[in-house]
Image: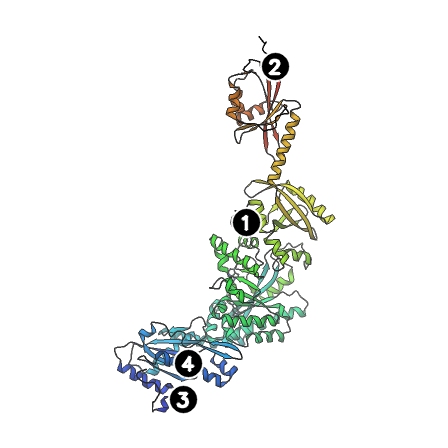
Amino acid sequence: MGEGNGEGNTYNNFIDELTGIYNRQGFYQYTANLLKQHPDISFCLLYWNVRKFKVVNDLFGRESGDKVLIYLANALKEEFGKETASYGRLEGDNFVCCVPMDIIEQEKWVRLGDVSFDADDSEYHFYSCCGLYKIIDPEISVAKMVDRARVAMDTVKNNYLKPYAWYEESMWGSMVEEQQMNNAFRKAITEKQFKVFYQPLCRATDGVITGAEALVRWEKPGEGMISPGKFIPIFEKNGLVSILDHYVWGEVCRMQKKRIDQGLRVVPVSINVSRVEFYNPHLCEEIYDIVQKYNVPTDLIKIEITESAYAADPTLVQDAVRKLHEYGFIVLMDDFGSGASSLNTLKDLPIDVLKIDMKFIDSFDKNQKSAVILEAVIRMAKWMQLSTVAEGVETKKEWEYLKSMECDVVQGYYFYHPMPEAEFERLLNQSMTKYADIDRDIPELDDVIQDAFSHGNSKESMIFYSMLGGMGIFEMTEDKLEILQVNRGYYEVIYGEETSLREFSKSLNKLVKEPEKTVLMEKCQIAKTTDEMQQAQIHYEREDGKFIWLNVKVRYIGSRGKRSLFYFAIDNIEEIKKAEQERYLLDYSAALVKVFDKVYRMDYEHGMVEVLHSGESSMKIKEKYYFVNFFEKFHNSIEWEGNKNVASIIANRELLDQELVKSKNGSFSVHYKVKNERLDIKEVSAMFFKVELQDGREEYLCCIKKERETKRAVE
Ligand code: C2E
Ligand code: CA
Ligand code: CA
């Protein structure tokens, strides 16, 4: 720094002994001179503080702390030593500098106060926060300028997501407000104004409550209920959130312990851990201590870590998750998708559950793309052996959709709003669930049934749900069959490969209707009594009204009162069935040629006439004609008896149908004479009628019988 900053300075009481740069006095004096000498330059004052610097001293000793400070002083020297600038250490870990604005605009100082630090074979990272004050009025004292930069720094001091802030006049005001908030906080804690609410978490398949999330509220006298969105961010900034969180965790443990002692139903409760807390090196021990204190098993407390904490400092969070696992806690990644993390970045983070941010649920039915992402996230999570929770489920439609995507757990207003402890307890005591039917009255599900539904982790069920053909589970009650769950293959079998996600959602939880219902119910009864696999071919009506042939195999899983569960697997047997119908028709026509000479099928769809059977046994190849050719063939030589319009009637399905309706026996018969080239005369009768096949399709047949043949006398 051309203008000298310490070295060789004779005023030793201006120099910081430890780091060799200016101390407070030195900085004030030198900076005042600097500003006076360069009235043409616009300057800026920066104020750094190392976050949690105390930890360095506490954990690694003063000596290490000193090393960090010297390191930082050197960093300043290196950065600004050659500039028209001043810098110094005020005291502790507070550093300042005064530099021309144009340097600041390059923003290279943003991470200047960060330190990496090796100890005990691990690397520790310390980040600083910075306040900036643009020197508009060089006449005010440097001390005042430093104060302003400090006020700006204070606003981000506990906000790990914001490394710096520029000074604004309003900051003095908000400082006061925060101070008031702090005072109110202490009072609120001692007076127990903070209330823990519980929002149930439900199993996606049937809505059974399997857990809850603890959410704090502030019942402030005179102000009513304040939501955490209002006060948590403030307490995160000033560090009070840690006290609040500890209070909430204690409250949750207290309730769990009370219920355990009273022999009541207990479900795991997740607690939120503020992102700020991860900078506390004792966080995990502190959580564990609370849980221990109340003597609650660790599997009844789950820990929610928000994605933004992980994004801010992956290593800190990774270490915390590992420790929490050692204690036996299940860890959820909260708000997944709200920030920048992708599933890929999560692969190094040993979490157990992915909680999908409600933003996804919000927009999925407006936005096809987010539905695709949502499904991809759920699928990927499955491959990573993570189970999934979707939060913010507000409608039945959303629930159905998530269910069809095989999301495991749902949470949201559609099921329950967050509720006070007493209400939550009543709910838990009351019943197994609101959504699973009341007469499903046995308190715990059998293992088998549980297995059937919990397809989260086991390898078998992975295969079950994502690889083999169409499968699912249905429930049989006295008079109905309801499909509860299907895999993706189900849709592929029924709709073909190119089904859109939209169609998926529509058709879940559907009732199987007549006539296939009776067929299947009978098979289910047999499967249940014999415990053997049963199968049936059914003609199944799709959502779009189209019928398809399915082969359905059913296997009994278990029963609960009047309800029984079955696995089912389906194959599309459309082709086989078509061939079968064809055979049926051929057999039918084979019988007809015992009476008639030739049997044709009138294929109105393709405008063709096809020989199905012919008395002339030599004929092997199927003959087909277009209607036009078929009739033209006879046209000139044909001699109709009575109705001359026969050709046009039979060429037109509607006209033929009219004739069929008119007749008593449902057939349309005509007689005609044909002459061949040799003028032999054949008298022929033809009968047209409809055959109904099993699947409801109708075929039009034309049977022809030669009545008499008059050979022309040979000359
Ligand atoms: P979060 O952890 O993502 O919690 C879920 C929030 O979504 C809760 O808001 C909940 O009431 C709300 N919610 C639940 N279902 C629905 C729904 O169907 N639709 C909509 N729109 N919202 C739904 P809440 O209780 O206001 O909490 C807001 C945030 O405050 C929480 O978000 C969490 O980050 C934080 N928070 C709450 N309690 C605590 C706590 O004890 N400690 C800490 N550190 N943070 C907490
Ligand atoms: Ca949460
Ligand atoms: Ca969340």
Query: Can residue 31 be seen by looking at this rendering?
Result: yes
Cα separation, mark 3 vs mark 4, equals 14 Å
Residue 75 percent coordinates (x, y): 39, 79
The type of residue carrying mark 4 is Leu
List x then y, in percent, for residue 704: 60, 22
Q: Quadrant of residue 711?
A: top right
Q: CA distance from mark 1 to mark 3?
A: 72 Å
Residue 504 numbered tag: 1
Amino acid at circle 3:
Glu
Closer to the camera in the image, 622 or 628: 622
| Viewer-side label of 1, 3 | 3
Dividing the picture into quarters, in which one does residue 594 lie? top right
Residue 710 percent location from the top left of the image: 60, 12
Name the element at disc 3: loop
Q: Is residue 309 depicted above or below 569 in this figure? A: below
Protein image colouring? rainbow
Amino acid on which disc 2 is placed? Glu
* Secondary structure category for the residue under label 2: strand
**Between 544 and 379, which is closer to the camera in this rendering?**
379
Q: Earlier in the sequence, mark 4 or mark 2?
A: 4
Comparing marks 1 and 2, which lies closer to the viewer?
2
Residue 709, disc: 2
- Helix, strand or loop at disc 1? helix
Q: Which residue is mark 3?
A: 17
Quadrant in which the N terminus appears: bottom left
**Closer-to-camera residue (486/382):** 382
Disc 1 vs disc 4: which is toward the camera?
4
